[in-house]
Image: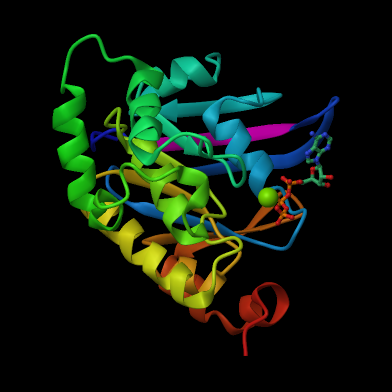
Amino acid sequence: MNGPAAGLELRDVVAGYGGQPILHSISFSVQPGERLVVVGPNGSGKSTLMKTVVGLLRPMSGAVRLGGADVTALGAPARAALGLAYIPQETNIFRNMTVLENLHVGYEFVAPSKGPTFSERLEAVLGLFPEIRVKLRSTAGHLSGGQRQMVAMAAALMPKPTVLALDEPSAGLSPRNAGLLFEVIGRVAASGVTMLIVEQNTQLGLGAADQGIVLVNGHVRLAAPAMTVRTDPEIRRLYLGGV
Ligand SMILES: Nc1ncnc2c1ncn2[C@@H]1O[C@H](COP(=O)(O)OP(=O)(O)OP(=O)(O)O)[C@@H](O)[C@H]1O
Ligand SMILES: [Mg+2]
């Protein structure tokens, strides 16, 4: 294989807790700039997969590769320094700080010794999130759920990551705000960031993705172009609650 290195790749990953596997031989690759959405029933292992990707959970076997480099042995901070940003489902902003302070923390988190300055990154990120430019001095905790999720994404993008991992970005949002958030996710993807997204709203998530994976009981039940997953009648009936 002589193609470009995948943005993110898992090979035969087995992972779980206390020696008990939850994920069974998971393999996939996301090409640079692509969006892969993972869907599946509650408890199927989606967040466990996310934790394994970002380095919070060490796999029992298998490999995680980032931009072609094997990062399996690295913890979360080292993976972040290599360009992997992670937004957990909850507690993903500092609510008592202003939006601008949150963006500072996001920038300093990876502490780039060289590369773009804070001001340069701020302008680039606000270009993707004009909605929060007018909120920079606001206390982050006073924003709406959708705005807070945008602040979390903006802060994660401040160090200029190459891969962004999002766990349930639309959780708790109204359908309208979830739709707006996925518009922003589209803008971020168009800027060249590779994305791995776990999403409960399967139609919205798969509608915004290149590839889709259906995870059931820790197994990849289907991996296909997102549109194929979205319209597969059996998968919709069994796992996605489709009509
Ligand atoms: N820290 C933990 N220790 C032990 N077991 C865990 C831990 N976290 C999750 N599990 C178990 O792993 C399985 C998968 O959980 P996980 O959170 O990955 O599912 P999920 O697909 O993200 O579910 P949801 O859609 O509800 O967020 C569940 O059986 C859960 O009980
Ligand atoms: Mg989860």
Judge by depth and name the residue closer to the eye, 33 or 94.
Answer: 94
Where residue 234 sits, quadrant-wise, is bottom right
Q: Is residue 98 above or below residue 197?
A: above
The x and y percentages for residue 84 are 40, 30
In the rendered view, does 122 fall on the left or right side of 100?
A: left
The x and y percentages for residue 8 are 41, 36
Q: Is residue 31 visible?
A: no
Where residue 2 sits, quadrant-wise, is top left
In the rendered view, does 87 fall on the left or right side of 218?
A: left
Q: Tell me where the magenta segment starts and ends, as one range.
A: 8-15
Ligand 1 location (quadrant): top right
In the rendered view, does 64 fall on the left or right side of 134?
A: right
- 92 part of magenta stretch: no
- 11 part of magenta stretch: yes
Residue at the top extreme of this rendering: 113
The quadrant of the image that shows the N terminus is: top left
Q: Is residue 103 visible?
A: yes
Question: What residue is drawn where x is 42% and y is 72%?
Answer: 179
The quadrant of the image that shows the C terminus is: bottom right
